[in-house]
Image (tube, rainbow, N blue to C red):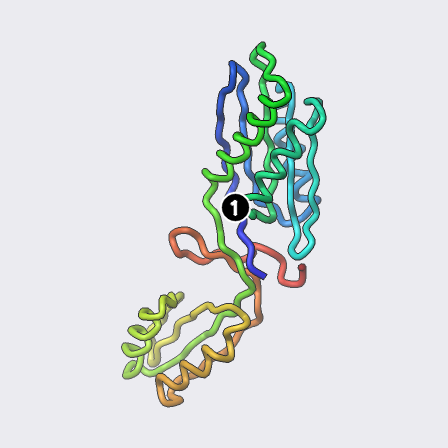
Amino acid sequence: MKFTTPQLEITVETTEKKSRFITTVVPILGVDEAEQALAAIREKHKGANHNCFAYRVGLGVPIERFSDDGEPSGTAGRPILEVIRRQQIDNVLVVVTRYFGGILLGANGLVRAYADGASQGLSAAPMLICDLMCTLHVTCDYGIYGKLEYTLGQQGIVMYDKTFTDVVAFDIVVPEADVEAQVAALSEWTNGQVKVDVLPAEYMGIAQDGSLVRGVWPSGNS
C-alpha cells in the first residue's frame, strides 16, 4: 500500500492579527510516538495559549485524533485534520501552537488560521513516497554490467551500493508486486547470466532527491 509521509520534523511560523501560529510537522510510526512528540512540543511551548493538533497514523484504516486545546469547538483540531486528509498525508502529527496577540479572530478566522498553518507546514515538509518494496541483490560479470547499467537507467531504476571485485554487485529496489517480472527481465536482458537474490519486503520511502529511506513503517504493520 502506497502512502506519503514527511521525511523529517519541520517548523514554520505565521502571524495573523498579532497572534503567532507556529506549526510543527512530525513523522510518526504509532500512537505512542505521536503522544510523546505532542508532549515534547507542549513542554517546549508551555507558555503558549493553545497547542492544537491532529494526527493520522496507520495504513488501511488509520487512527485519527485531534484537539482544539481550549479554542472554540471545531475551530482548530478538526480543520488541521481536514488539511492532512486533503493532502493525503499519512503517519503524521501536526501541531499548531498559538501565542495570542490580543485581537480576537472569531470562529471563521480561527478555522482559516489553523487550516492555513497546517497547510503551510505540510507544504514546507519534504515528503517521502512510500511503498512495500523488495531489494534485489544483483551479481554479474563485468562484460554485461554496462548493458545492465544502461537498460536499468533507461527505465529509471536506480542502482544502489555498487561493489566491484572479481564480479560486479549492486542492489535495485522494486515494488513487491513487481519482483517476479523484474527478476525475469534481468534474466532476459543477460541471457540468464545474472544472479539475483530477493531480500524480504519492507516499507521504504523515495525522497524528493531520489534517495532511498528505509524504516518508514514496520513491515508487519498495516
214 to the left or right of 57: left
71 and 174: which is toward the camera: 71
Asked if residue 82 is positioned above or below residue 71 in the image, the reply reads: below
Which residue does the numbered mark 1 point to in the structure image?
6
Q: Report the quarter where the N terminus lies.
A: bottom right
Q: Residue furthest bottom?
A: 191
At a point 40% along the width and 84% down the height, the residue shown is 194
Quarter of the image where one finds residue 157: bottom left
**Residue projecting furthest to the top:** 102
Front position in the image: 142 or 175? 175
Residue 215: name its quadrant.
Answer: bottom right
Position of 39 with respect to 8 (left or right) is: right
Please provide percent x and percent y for residue 103: 57, 11
Question: For the view shown, which residue lies furthest in the front direction?
Answer: 108
Q: In the image, is 9 to the left or to the right of 49?
A: left
Badge 1 amino acid: Pro
- Which element type, helix, strand or loop, lies under badge 1? strand
Q: Quadrant of the C terminus?
A: bottom right
The structure residue drawn at horizontal position 53% and vertical position 66%, both measured from the top left corner, is 133
Residue at (54, 24) in percent of width and height: 21
How far across and how far down the image is residue 218, in percent? 63, 58
Residue 116, percent across and down? Answer: 52, 30
Residue 6 position (above or below residue 61): above
- Circle 1 residues within 10 Å: few <14, some 14–19, many ≥20: many
Q: Who is closer to the viewer here, 107 or 116? A: 107
Vertical order, 208 against 50 (above or below): below
Q: At x 66% / y 44%, what residue is drawn?
A: 33
Quadrant assignment, res 167: bottom left
Left-right relation of 58 to 9 = right
Q: Position of residue 13 (x, y in %)?
A: 49, 26
